[in-house]
Amino acid sequence: MPYLGSEDVVKELKKALCNPHVQADRLRYRNAIQRVIRHMTQGLDMSGVFMEIVKASATVDIVQKKLVYLYMCTYAPLKPDLALLAINTLCKDCSDPNPMVRGLALRSMCSLRMPGVQEYIQQPILNGLRDKASYVRRVAVLGCAKMYNLHGDSEVDGALVHELYSLLRDQDPIVVVNCLRSLEEILKHEGGVVINKPIAHHLLNRMSKLDQWGQAEVLTFLLRYQPRSEEELFDILNLLDSFLKSSSPGVVIGATKLFLILAKKFPHVQTDVLMRVKGPLLAACSSESRELCFVALCHVRQILHSLPGHFSSHYKKFFCSYWEPHYIKLQKVEVLCELVNDENVQQVLEELRGYCTDVSVDFAQAAIFAIGGIARTYTDQCVQILTELLGLRQEHITTVVVQTFRDLVWLCPQCTEAVCQALPGCEENIQDSEGKQALIWLLGVHGDRISNAPYVLEDFVENVKSETFPAVKMELLTALLRLFLSRPAECQDMLGRLLYYCIEEEKDMAVRDRGLFYYRLLLLGIDEVKRILCSPKSDPSLGLLEDQPERPVNSWASDFNTLAPVYGKARWATIFKHQGTEHCGPKLPHTASLATSGHLISEENKERVQELQDSEALMLVPSCQLTAEYFEKTWLSLEVAHQQVLPWQGEVHPDTLQMALQVVNIQTIAMSRVGAQPWKAYLGAQDGAGCLFLTELLLEPENSKLQISVKQSEKRTEILSSFISVLETVIGTIGDMKS
Amino acid sequence: MIHSLFLINSSGDIFLEKHWKSVVSRSVCDYFFEAQERATEAENVPPVIPTPHHYLLSVYRHKIFFVAVIQTEVPPLFVIEFLHRVVDTFQDYFGVCSEPVIKDNVVVVYEVLEEMLDNGFPLATESNILKELIKPPTILRTVVNTITGSTNVGDQLPTGQLSVVPWRRTGVKYTNNEAYFDVIEEIDAIIDKSGSTITAEIQGVIDACVKLTGMPDLTLSFMNPRLLDDVSFHPCVRFKRWESERILSFIPPDGNFRLLSYHVSAQNLVAIPVYVKHNISFRDSSSLGRFEITVGPKQTMGKTIEGVTVLSQMPRGVLNMSLIPSQGTHTFDPVTKMLSWDVGKINPQKLPSLKGTMSLQAGASKPDENPTINLQFKIQQLAISGLKVNRLDMYGEKYKPFKGIKYMTKAGKFQVRT
């Protein structure tokens, strides 16, 4: 806070304050004090005039008193010995007949924040708690917390706590809320204020009398209360009902959270509540205040994690308008990306397409990535839009489109052909490292389908000396070696030159080592290179497992209406750890391990993938191609070898199921459309020995059962049982992900 | 809850700080400045900024950042709403809320902040209660104070805090008893190239100014209450009565307050009162572009559209524009590329238009994006949703009050894509 040049000002003010003429004139005196305060608020060090200001405290003028107290609260920690001089005046004011003066004095005294003040303030606080003016009681109640904070280590005074608990019955609503706040601080080492049944019901009944801040806070405190019976629970929910319609979004969201937490065993109540706050939440999303919009949007995203269809019909609310700040636009794009469904996909994509040419580079790129996200489900339309974007030949657009293509090809192999056709020509518009890497990777892995791939890579090899990013060079080495395997004639010479450069001239050790590694690998013979470099070119299962649909509401309910949805749980956890236990909030997760964002597959799913592979004791042939006619003929000619019923909730997502089955090499022959009743699917698979497995899935939604009938071309029971276990695992996995 | 508050202007100076608990060093704002630098424009500074030991929650209004420093977990909406309340209060007190005004009235600002929060918790935030604690400065009062040496501080405790109805003080007396209601609707809309509506919704509020003696109990009924699908009320409104009878029944607070706010978002209910005809074209070869827009009335139920302004951010490639308006005045800022046209009233017989050419950067390819047009306008005596108040009755008091209701429609975020 020290400030250069403040000395002159202090000297001048000191002179003014000491001048008896000024002191005699009330107005001039007050003016001088006001100037001190003004300088103080701007960060100048005014502690030099402390003595003079303390003298000014003995006055009947209430404004002057206020100013003096304001000053003292700021500088008392710096001049504790001088501040003690003022305590006498303060104590006297605490018994002034005017309640406002009493409240003011008490509040200032509690805010002095200097050692040794505790012994002076204890009695005034106790008197204040029994004052007849509610204004003073409010101050006194919070004063208890301030007093306790001054001496953090001292024992909690049982009598005081008891007194505060009894003040929860005070007739003034703000005193009640202040009691809660105060108790919370005093008892923080014991887990905060205890909300038992009488207190909870008392608070619930007083709720309507509180102001919005009080309501929001009481709603948070009530989260701690566990109703004893179902009946009580629903009584509470009924009482809280009207707060879902409050004019303050804070109260609405607070009430929603309480509903979600209290009704954690009743999923239908949770869904119902989320349904009812849809209106207020959407209103907050288009509120005048940008900041409110932003936070509301973060909460919308959170809800979408569990109920993907929840806001689908309101997708237009999330269209960006030009004047909105970036952070809102980026959130809206994310929301749009999450709520697409069959009905609105066309409009959403058109809208996103418009954003791709936005003036702001960040926003344009976010929109392109969003299209890439939607492409996992609606591949053809999105790839077409992305291809058109390449035609604009804008650097910042091309690089992001190519990156999106790279991710897409890996997750949805069916679009490889389209991507390969779109790629030629875009190398001219890519300058940055990320984009180059993506392009080179695509050329390397799918070079056999892109006619000019070797020539594009040749350009890169020519310019490798001026290439600044080592990551690009590494990618180039790998890609060229891969391409060499599929098109040796065109690449051999280039590869030689590149390896020579990397080994002899390159300065970056990592690139050089990679070059040496490939060189030695080549010495071992081409088969060895193939074995190491020709990994699978795509992995649809990854995409499938990544967009885990529908996390249960309970998994995030405790984060609702906190800062966690705003900047992610992982981030929150690290910040929290920094803080240590000093400011321990009772309900926060302590480890960062809960954060799943950032990993493509969460730990749990990795195990599942493992499981799937282990259970494959029988080897299903990946390229089994059954035609529908052949399937039908065989199906009719065979007897049912096994029949089984599995539990199943809700609708089936054919794409998800089909992809999951593809992972374990089971082919889908035919399927009814979504929503058909009963829903049927026919599956076929073949093992290494040529044994056919034909399967019928029959789903009857009304009794939530999935019936599986399997027919087998040869009677071999041990293989049949392992086939069925594979099928069960797949269906089980999808079922789990839904619920 | 709220540890400290910093007021920062858009050039990054802290011009006011207030601490409710221990003093937090100004250096915590360095994280904010970092974010401010990263964001190209002031609006783009994110509202929540995490730092190693604190969280900075900010709102940006009137070119001032109000930055709250938080140390423990809090509901973010709570803090943001509170900050907005602080800004509203300042505006209420000083008429405008700007850096010079706050600096001039720093003492009152401090007093108000002191009453609004204690130990970081909101205390008195209702404007009419605050105004009794600390009287707002007016020119007259400043003069009187200078002469008589009296003060801005009320020396009586606000009586409202003792009444059974927390939002109304007891013993209110007026010679003229009056109750006025303003129905104000804002249209937020996005209109696409061809003139069809992409989204449209109405955000409406009913603001009241009630100066009635005693404890009046009012009921307000609408001709068409079903119109309001998403309503939120002032705490004084009896919610149960609204749910069963669709009638607003309440004991009003004294003075100005917002009775309710509502949304009408069903698209077929939202009439769009204006249209914009536009022809903006860039050609690949030439360095000139054509620009022509016309504004006209659409569904206005016979009312005139006033206060029309057109704002448009032109693409970066546009160097200058030479335009001729048929009415009003226009400006184009070649640095920010902002075109603004102050149209005024729309005369349906002679539609206002703005025509001319744009000069583009020579040699550059034509801009990819077309500019978006933002429209501001006002329509007096019309609630565009068709909402109508049926009657207002008063019970509990004997006198006859003056009653009045006014309607107004405004453009909110009204945007036309080209």
Image (cartoon, helix red, strand yellow):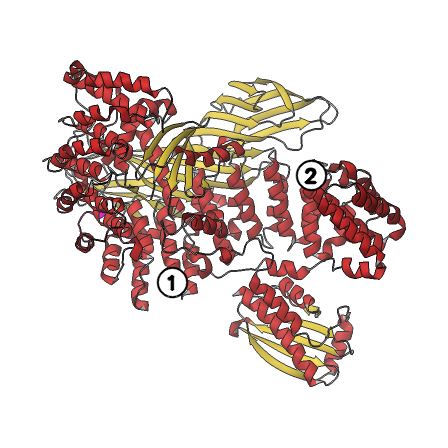
In the rendered image, the vertical position of residue A95 relative to residue A548, given as above or below: above
Query: Observer-nearest residue: A50 or B247?
Result: A50
Q: Quadrant of the N terminus of chain B?
A: top left
Type of amino acid at the residue the image marks with label 1? Ala
| Badge 2 element | loop
Query: Observer-nearest residue: A54 or A682?
Result: A54
Q: Quadrant of the C terminus of chain B?
A: top right
Q: Determine which residue is flagged by label 2.
A: A432
Residue drawn at point x = 25 percent, y = 29 percent: A71
Query: Observer-nearest residue: A648 or B407?
Result: A648
Residue B274 spot, x, y in % from top left = 51, 32
In the rendered image, the vertical position of residue A272 relative to residue A186, given as above or below: below
Instruction: Mark yes or no: residue B140 visible.
Output: no
Mark whose residue sits in front, 2 or 1: 2
Q: Determine which residue is flagged by label 1.
A: A263
Marks 2 and 1, how far apart in space? 51 Å
> Which residues make up the magenta segment?
A169-173
CB-based contact (under 8 Å), mark 2 and mark 1: no
Characterize the local packing of mark 2: few (<14), some (14-19) or many (20 or more) Cα atoms within 10 angstroms: some
Q: Residue B143's image quarter?
A: top left
Residue A673 spot, x, y in % from top left = 63, 65
